[in-house]
Amino acid sequence: MTVHCLANVLGLLFLPLLLTGLIQRVKSLWSGRRGPPLLQPTYDVLKLFRKSPVYSATATPLFRIAPWLFLVTACASAAVVPLLGSEPIASFPFDFVWFAYVWALGRVALMLAALDTGSAFEGMGSAREATFSTVLEPVLFLVAAALCSRSGAHSLQLALRFEAAEGSFLLTTCAVLALLVVLQVEASRMPVDDPSTHLELTMVHEVMVLDHCGADLAAIQIGSAIKLFVGSSMIAALLNPWAASGGALALGAQLVLSALVAVFVGTIESLVARLKLRLVPNYIALALGLGALALLLGAWGRVSSG
Amino acid sequence: MPSFLLSVPVLVVGALLAVGLRSNRASAAVALASQACACILVLLGVGRPLFGGAAIELLWPWPPPITTIPFRVDALGAFFLAWSLPLTLLGTLYAIGYLRPSFESGRHGGPHFALLNVVALSFVLIYSVQNALVFLLGWEVAAVAAWLLVIWDYRSQKIRFAGFNYLVSTHVGLFVLVAAFMLLHSKTASMDFAAFSRFLQQPSPARGTIFLLLGTAFALKSAFFPFHTWLPRAHAAAPAHVSALMSGVIHKAGLFGFVRFTLLMGRPEEWMGWTVLVFGAVSAFFGVLYTASQRDLKRLLGYSSTENVGIAALGFGLGYLGWSWGATDLALIGFAGGLLHVLNHAIFKCLLFYAAGAVQRAAHSVDLERLGGLAKRLPRTAALFLIGTLAGSALPPFNTLVSEFIIYTGLLSGQGPSPEANVVLVVAAAGLAFVGAVSALSATRAFGVTFLGQPRDARIHVGAEPPASMLVPMLCHAALAIVCGLAPQLGLGMVRASVGLFPFCTLADLERVLAPLAGLVYASRVLALLLLAAGLLRWWQGAGARRSPTWACGYLAGSPRMQYTGSSFSEHFARIFASCMPALRRERIASEIFPALPGQLATHHADAVEQRIFEVLARGEDAITEVSERIPGHPRFAFAAGLCAVLIIGAVAWGGWR
Amino acid sequence: MSLFRSVRVRLSQGSQTIADVRTAVPQGFRGLPVLGSAPCGECRACIEACPTQAIETDPLRLDLGRCVFCAACEDACPEGTIQFSAEPKLGAARREDLVLAAGQAEPLRVRASATFSRLFGRSLKLRQVSAGGCNACELELNAVVNVNFDAQRFGIEWVASPRHADALVLTGPLTRTMKEAVRLAWDAMPEPRFLVAVGACAISGGLYQAAAGTDRSFLDSVGPSLFVPGCPPHPLTFLNAILDFLGVDG
């Protein structure tokens, strides 16, 4: 038990920024440049910790507290997800409910920090982020309910298990695709949000952090990387055939699958343009449809098999 | 005489003294003292049934035709009494500080404090009495007292209209309730709840009708959609503590009535459960949609009440369904979650209204479009409002997440009798998740636009922080929100015995279905510790850092009016749901290249149901005018027509009598 | 499918990144001027030809910070004393290092900063402010992060917000109207930070030295830590200067 705990904590310390670096490398490859090294996000974060902060005159203490609340909630959400393919740090029935609301708390903290600057820019980012998350929230619940009805148990660890049973393939596909959309929205990836743009037309997450600097910015970057890692771990756990047995094979498969998810995300980012803002809720509604389909498959699948 | 009934004369005496005394300070002191006494008496009295002991029964003799008034305080009544009176006491304490400016300008506060006593009195009646007539009396007393409290600022025409709107709506509810009781009386020839219960436990065609009538009456009282139209107006018009008490305490009587008649009715039919579930989901959905678009902070909180009673009804609907299917686990979860949510909502809603009242007192406005940057001038109010909004969005580690989590465990458990039922329950859970996300949007908007950033309207002059009499109730509520989140056994301990009243409930079963809470509580405690540590560390650390203006791309002509306003924050969201939430848009945008006059844009989100009601009423009025114009305006003709009508009616009545 | 088309396009592009920016010499580039040691006597042809008064005699000196690389001096000199080579490395950490003396044949060396190389050696975020220039410098700076020069492989990137930046890269002669904006951008940056002056206009005022609309008082209060001459400077000039300043091996 404690070995798993320690392994998960170590994974949480080192892997998120590596995954972000991997996405950057994939994007560099697609655009034909050498690109930054794999450890560049780590170097950036380490440098940010050495900068002394400067705060806006309009901001309250909430501004410098919020990025750390965001980081704590990101870590807390990672505690219930099987990050390395076997067991999460903690698991209890219906922990995916707590997971979703902890992510919501982190999001609210960031949005409030953005509104604290009193700038029109940051307010715009908060509004967009809030709007997209309202349409997104049911998707996670539909997918989790579908997986729970398939596996019969109610915790994330047991729900995110690979099932080789017949007829499970379609449900897994729907769940994976829906979770991919969740990843794209929550971790601010294309086609929902462009993490490398700074044009007013296209920013959602980036614009909220325009006024943060130094260690606060590092906390936000680490938190976002953790959310990305958690999202890809969930997808990888669903596709990992050795997750139930555990051991080195499960760990290896999980890492490879997480890396593949990162490569996929990087490829989408390089080849697909950002959706028009008006169309993003429609795109998320597509994920809602996939979640509903997964739910129906889960509900009737159990009847036919059980 | 049981001690809880002793509170009645205490409150009456307190009310009379408060009216009679000349000095406002003395009236307030008398009201506070009498309410405190009543609280203690009630709490001492209902302690036994609250924690699973025997119910208190009493038959009070009364002259005919009532002959006896049966009182019965069982666990459910004890639960509602246990928190209604203390919260009313806190509200009265808040009123002292809140109304001080009015008192200083010469208004006499005695009647107001007396009415607060009367409201507390009505609770004792409604929650303990078992006779329909006395129940109606308590209902009416509560309604009229609330109306008189709402129109404290009666000099304003808008406020008088809002009060009148409230009075009319509450009496429509009363008529429906009277109709239900008359139907029951015609079937049982009695006015006692015990007789009603014996009748309702038998299957009969009237059962469904009575359920619908009672449901409508209680839905009107508790402001379910689409019977909620009076709520936003009343909340915007009333003083802050009255809004708090109305939303948090007085209107919960509707939910009490609902659960009470569920217990009397016995095992419901499945369609009743689906009705309650759908009504709850629809109320939650529409309530939260409207919170996201309001510019008046108190109207926003009013719609949030609609949302939360919808969530509680979601729990009750789940309970109904579980009971009708024989899935007792689901029923236990549903009723436990719903009742706990009622308590949690009272806790955070009162806090939010008190904080909004502090804002109104300091800035003389609760208009989101004009406020901003209040956190610098009112840091304590800001912190308390933040706790309130975070609790309201069911975010960890506050109390509302516990009750919503319980409801989620029921909806997502997959214990329904058929896959179709399970799918519908999961869709309801997804709807609840949507409601949670929208309330997070609304919370961010309400807190962020009011307290953060810079003031949007330079003409608003912000006064001082609220005085101690206003801060103490807010602190109590905030502490309760945090404590009930980290140690939900406190709230559950009060709810347990009420759920135990259901015939299928055993305490062992209840503990079993609430077992998943342990994981949530542990996780929330760890999270709270980490958040507190991170927050405090960071607060102390960065206090002396260098300051520079917010980076605005070097633009030199910036102004606070360029910030995002409340309506711009929710604009995209409102456009997505424009079919449910129609927006009126008035714009004057110049077409010339160099316009002579500046352009104008105003958006207004009116309540869709209220709009429709006014449209229908207006069309009805037009129709009546049209018809009456057709009738010749000759007096003799009118006299003859009236005589004919009386003769016809008399003949029909005489014929029917025969 | 468009994915296959994208792969085909990508493969056809090959790799267009300059492998070693430290030794690359751009073709046809007018770079470091070399001053011969021959005595000039009374001839002042180059001084009169230079539009920015960059040249002085007795002894012959050429101020790279003022030079706009027009080669009018090279054309005017009857002896061919001034010859422009193709060397792109022109940066300096001190203003006086930019003044070239006769007979100086080696390229300029930027003195690496110990503090900044420790802090920003692997990650440097730059914020560009254009203080009233002609935009030629900005175009070249924009090219620093393109596929050819790819500054991101060294961890060097342009960022939008000064709060995220480590260095302010200033171009243009610093007009009066941009004075407040430049001050705001500098104040918004968290410490440690440094200023880079890029282009003749930023370093010395260039062609606008005597113009009425300029206000260079900002540079008196905040001294640049790095000077990158040119009009406009080549991306290789800028990149090499930054890499030398941070002590990064090519």
Image (cartoon, grey):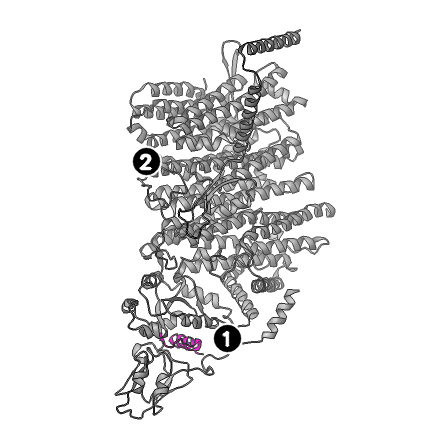
Q: Residue at x 30, y 77 (%)?
A: C95
Picture quadrant of residue C102: bottom left
Q: Position of residue B460 (x, y in %)?
A: 33, 41
| Residues at discs 1 and 2 in contact (Cβ within 8 Å) | no
Pointer 2: residues within 10 angstroms few (<14), some, or many (20+)? few
Residue C233 horizontal/vertical position (percent)? 40, 76
Quadrant of res B188 = top right
Residue at 37% of width from left, 85% of height from top? C33
Q: Is residue C213 above or below residue B149?
A: below
Residue C10: tell me if it is visible.
yes
Label 1 crowd bin: few (<14), some (14–19), many (20+), radius 10 Å: some
The residue pinned by badge 1 equals C148
Query: In the rendered structure, which amino acid carries the disc numbered 2?
Result: Ala
Side of B651 relative to B473 (left or right): right
> Is B602 situated above or below B642?
below
Which is more toward the observer, A49 or B568? B568
| Place of residue B583 in the rendered image (x, y in percent of width and height, measured from the top left) | 51, 40
**Which secondary structure lies at badge 1?**
loop
The tag on residue B468 is 2
Q: Please state which amino acid type lies under the numbered disc 1.
A: Asn
C155 lies left or right of A306: left
- At horizontal 40% and vertical 44% (from top left) the residue drawn is B450
Instruction: Kindly identify which chain the residue marked by label 1 belongs to.
Output: C
What is the quadrant of the N terminus of chain A in the image? Answer: bottom right
Magenta stretch holds residue B100: no
State the image coordinates of residue B12 (x, y, percent, origin top left).
Answer: 39, 19
User: Residues in magenta?
Assistant: C227-250
Q: Foreground residue, B40 or C18?
A: C18
Read off the chain for label 2: B
Tell me how far mark 1 sits from mark 2, CA to CA. Answer: 67 Å
Q: Marks 1 and 2: which is nearer the front?
A: 1
